[in-house]
Amino acid sequence: MKGNIIVGQSGGPTAAINSSLAGVFRTAKDRGAKKVYGMMHGVQGLLQERYIDLSDHIKTELDAELLKRTPAAFLGTCRYKLPEIHEDRDVYEKIFGILEKLEIESFIYIGGNDSMDTIKKLSDYAIITGHPCRFVGCPKTIDNDLALTDHTPGYGSAAKYIGTSVKEIIRDSFSLEYDRGLVTIVEIMGRNAGWLTGAAALSKGEDCAGPDMIFLPELPFDLQGFSDRVKKLLKKRKSVVVAVSEGIKIEGGKYVCELGQSSDFVDAFGHKQLSGTAAYLANFIAGETGCKARAIELSTLQRSASHAASRVDILEAYQVGGAAVKAADEGDSGKMVVLTRISDDPYQCGTEVKDVHKIANDEKVVPRDWINKEGTYVTDEFISYVRPLIQGDVSPVMVDGIPRHLYAPTEL
């Protein structure tokens, strides 16, 4: 590697996204990069010429270790959709002009589906114009919905947090007794893919029965069937805990959250903000049964809980960051690094690169045969898939009893 490299972070943060950034930085330096620039708030910040030299912020091995343990996007993130090339070439000319000024040899973008759309468009423009810069995607998303990769960095830590939190919620729900019972609805992220919600089943073990039901967005949600099942359970026990995806829909395709008061916010990629599913169902079931009903929305906690990060996840995030730099240095462009599972026991996983055109804007969902016949729980195959990804812990660097993070220059 003879020139400079630039890296950005995009989309929703994770507990592991900065580990990938550390992997990019360290590998680029080891392979001879002169400078490693970080774009502030992704490609949107790059268009405003907001970038930093990462060497000014990652000066020691301790800094690198702190970065790997720091949640949120160190560089700041964005949800910016590049226009189609034929619609606005000026945007691309500006980006490539900045890359030439900085003598950028390789462009690495850490993100999910929408971020891979950015890599696809920039690599296509480079081919059209004959520009030598190489563009490689580094996978990241707690939703685990990227195509062609076994799983995505960020998912394992979020799954570990969800399994842990749901177990604690179940334990708490049995502490008090209510005359007509208690129903707790836990809302979990994931949009149209149920990978995160299915992770609630990880709470099940010798000391915990796990949630009573789990509803994924891959199947239509039956409101009356849900009510009937809850009523039946309340005849047997005083507490019922249900995990639901934020993206569950009734027959016909309407989101459950839209049945109540929901936000009309839509991001640049056309994604509607999904929130309020648990609140609606809690109110609905309280009216149906007369019991106490509680809604718990894990929200951003499930993606920012670095104190509960999976060691496997952090190591793999670092690994794919390094693999992205290696791929670009060896001539790949228009590609994304993917994780390929070699075995479950013992768990082994390697990396490859795949054509980003076959990944961008696609959505990998939970297979139907990994959901039980009734659509109310995940199968053992799902558990076998996710359990290796949550193994091990990453001890935070504690100062005065609170985790220490690497200072993020996101206000620049």
Image (tube, helix red, strand yellow):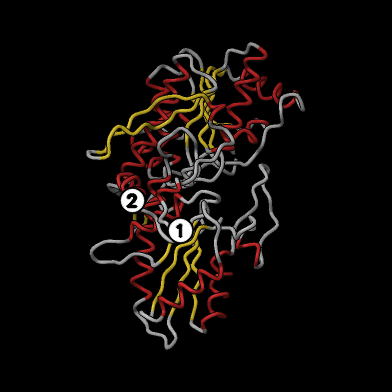
Among numbered discs 1 and 2, the one appearing first in the sequence: 1
In the drawing, does residue 75 fall left or right of residue 252? left
User: Please, is residue 187 above or below residue 284 in the view?
Assistant: above
Name the residue located 46 percent from the left edge and 29 percent from the top edge. 55
In the drawing, does residue 207 fall left or right of residue 196? left
Q: Amino acid at mark 1?
A: Gly
Q: Where the C terminus falls, by quadrant?
A: top right
Residue 145's disc is none
Query: Residue beneath label 1, please?
Result: 375
In the drawing, does residue 174 fall left or right of residue 324? left
Most foreground residue, 46 or 335 = 335
SS class, disc 2: helix
Most foreground residue, 253 or 168 = 253
Q: Amino acid at mark 2?
A: Ile
Q: Where the N terminus falls, by quadrant?
A: top left
Q: Position of residue 244 (x, y in %)?
A: 49, 61
- Decide: few, some or many residues near mark 2? Use Cα within 10 Å; few <14, some 14-19, many ≥20: some
User: Please, is residue 92 above or below residue 48 in the view?
Assistant: above
Most foreground residue, 280 or 227 = 227
Query: Residue beneath label 2, please?
Result: 383
Name the residue located 33 percent from the left edge and 50 percent from the top edge. 383
